[in-house]
Amino acid sequence: MNLHRVESQLTSLERLVPHLTEHGCDISAQDAARTLMRYFDAAALERDDQVLGTAYAKLRDRLKAIAEGRSGRLSMDQVAAFSRFYREQMLRAETGMLPLDPRYRLDS
């Protein structure tokens, strides 16, 4: 797993929300949504992690609507949850450790 590439995609996803607010579902937003779907679809998230796969399936529906120019809405809460889940998956893969139980996390 290329951590730099993953982080770059997550950052692009996080930047898409304010872009949509400011510019609507323009060509740049549509292109970004298509690129993000290609990347995360190739990652086969459903197979690797059920929670992450479920979070992505919901997010993918929104990205598809944006890519097709049908919607300019994307929830920052949904994006933040997906990004957090994905970063936790990266942590598990890199360290072999499980993330802390959410009840004991300081940043929750």
Image (spheres, grey):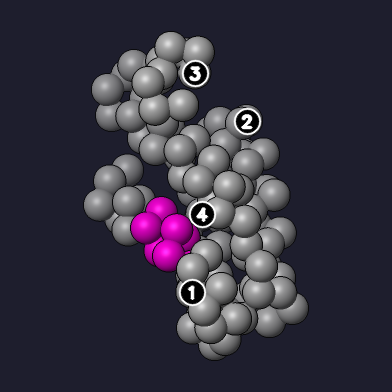
x then y, percent, for residue 52: 57, 36
Q: CA distance from mark 2 to mark 1?
A: 29 Å
**Would you say the residues marked 2 and 3 are in contact, meaning their CB atoms lie under 8 Å apart?**
no
Residue on which disc 3 sits? 102
In the picture of the structure, the residue carrying the numbered disc 4 is 40
Whether residue 44 is visible here, answered yes or no, is: no
Q: Earlier in the sequence, mark 1 or mark 3?
A: 1
Q: Nearer the viewer, residue 27 or 74?
A: 74
SS class, disc 4: helix
Q: Nearer the viewer, mark 1 or mark 4?
A: 1
- Kindly check if marks 1 and 4 are in contact, taking CB atoms under 8 A apart as contact: no
Task: Tell me if label 2 and label 4 are in contact, CB under 8 Å.
Answer: no
Q: Which residue is mark 2?
A: 50
Instruction: Count residues near mark 3 (Cα–Cα under 10 Å), then give few for <14, some for 14-19, many for 20+.
Output: few
Hey, what amino acid is under mark 3?
A: Pro
Secondary structure found at label 3: helix
Q: How many marks?
A: 4
Q: Label 2 neighbourhood size at 10 Å, few (<14), some (14-19), many (20+)?
A: few
